[in-house]
Image: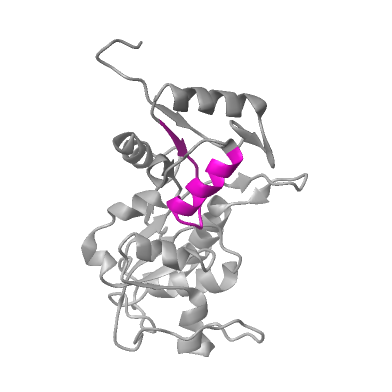
């Protein structure tokens, strides 16, 4: 109900609601243009990510033919902005495309690192030929990790799960150490989404972060006897809905 004292606000999902595959539904353009003309606030909430909200807003502006600002976009990893500064000051493992490292920096994480960089620190951590490596920017011999952050879909499941398990089983986040016996998870573990499957142009759905989470947890439990303690973001988590509502 709209009164002179209240203005409606609308939060849209994207895939399957405004677009189908690569095609923008015709009703989408009409609806968003009308909302823009009437100055009715609207936002987009998706479990996708791997890029900054600013870049996603630019892409949506082109597709939907209305001005969209980064404040109108909530991605799966957007609520990671709220992670405490004491974690943001430490080294954090970022899982997802390489671009997620810069997204993490934009959220205030001072020392994000990806698995390719960890492997160059000590190649025997993932001892297989043909591995792509990037120079390690931090002193992993002396600096502990503060968290594991699953930002977006991984295309290197094996090395990401191996290194994440090593960090979570370590002594106080110090990579290369191990709790014997295992007592508790060394650092927090955050996930941006929990979708088992997602769709693209292939006729069958593809594995999402939820599938990675199942494999990760299964191996971790085989090693420790305990489940990974995950702080979960993304739809349909209340924390993500509250975060989006506050922005709206």
Identified at 41% across, 70% down, the residue is 93
Residue 39 image point, x, y percent: 39, 25
Identified at 59% across, 32% down, the residue is 18
Residue 70 image point, x, y percent: 41, 46
In the foreground, 132 or 217: 132
For the N terminus, the quadrant is top left
In this image, 200 relative to 193: left or right? right
- Mark yes or no: residue 176 visible: yes
- Mark yes or no: residue 225 visible: no
In this image, 61 relative to 184: left or right? right
Identified at 47% across, 73% down, the residue is 114
Residue 86 image point, x, y percent: 21, 65
Looking at the image, residue 8 lies above or below residue 107: above
Q: Give the quarter of the image for residue 2.
A: top left
Extreme left residue here?
A: 86
Residue 105 shown in magenta: no
For the C terminus, the quadrant is top left
Q: Give the quarter of the image for residue 140.
A: bottom left
């Amino acid at each position: 109900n709209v009164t002179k004292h209240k203005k409606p606000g609308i939060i849209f999902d994207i895939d399957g609601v405004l677009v189908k595959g690569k095609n923008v539904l015709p009703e989408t353009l009409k609806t968003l243009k009308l909302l823009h003309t009437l100055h009715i606030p609207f936002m987009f909430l998706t479990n996708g990510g791997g890029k900054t909200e600013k870049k996603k807003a630019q892409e949506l502006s082109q597709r939907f033919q209305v001005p969209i600002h980064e404040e109108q976009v909530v991605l799966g990893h957007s609520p990671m902005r709220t992670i405490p500064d004491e974690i943001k000051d430490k080294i954090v493992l970022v899982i997802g495309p390489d671009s997620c490292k810069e997204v993490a920096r934009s959220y205030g994480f001072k020392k994000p690192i990806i698995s390719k960089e960890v492997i160059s620190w000590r190649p025997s951590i993932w001892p297989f030929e043909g591995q792509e490596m990037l120079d390690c920017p931090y002193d992993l011999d002396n600096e502990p990790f503060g968290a594991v952050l699953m930002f977006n879909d991984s295309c290197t499941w094996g090395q990401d799960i191996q290194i994440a398990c090593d960090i979570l089983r370590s002594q106080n986040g110090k990579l290369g150490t191990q709790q014997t016996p295992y007592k508790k998870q060394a650092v927090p573990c955050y996930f941006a989404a929990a979708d088992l499957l997602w769709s693209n142009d292939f006729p069958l759905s593809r594995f999402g972060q939820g599938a990675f989470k199942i494999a990760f947890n299964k191996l971790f439990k085989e090693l420790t006897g305990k489940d990974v303690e995950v702080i979960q973001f993304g739809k349909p988590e209340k924390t993500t809905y509250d975060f989006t509502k506050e922005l709206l």
